[in-house]
Amino acid sequence: MRFAEINLFGVYVAPISVMMLTAWLVVIALRRVADHFGLLGHVWHPPLFVFALYLIVLSFTVLIVAR
């Protein structure tokens, strides 16, 4: 599939930017859930874990959209 630019209020943006924003919002929600249950206290480097989680969610988003 070929990705096409998205028209946001007259400005054409790359589709990866919309996917990055979507992944960021999902990671914020997942991070809040992890903070609520105290899961981030069990990982070695929490910011690195959150970054890896962001990359996983972004990759999953790109694969879903490309299908």
Image (tube, rainbow, N blue to C red):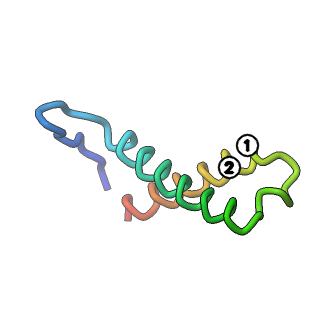
The picture places residue 62, in percent across and down from the top left corner, at 45, 55
| Residue designated by label 2 | 50
Using the image, tell me which numbered label, if any, was put on residue 47: 1
The picture places residue 42, in percent across and down from the top left corner, at 86, 60
Q: What residue appears at the point 76 percent right and 64 percent down from the top-left corner? A: 38
Locate residue 5: give its quadrant: top left
The foreground one among 41 and 63 is: 41
Kind of residue at badge 2: Val
Using the image, tell me which numbered label, if any, was put on residue 24: none
The foreground one among 30 and 60 is: 30
The picture places residue 29, in percent across and down from the top left corner, at 53, 59
Locate residue 53: give its quadrant: bottom right
Image quadrant containing the C terminus: bottom left
Q: Is residue 15 above or below residue 62?
A: above
- Is 49 positioned to the left or the right of 58 in the image? right
- Is 29 positioned to the left or the right of 67 in the image? right
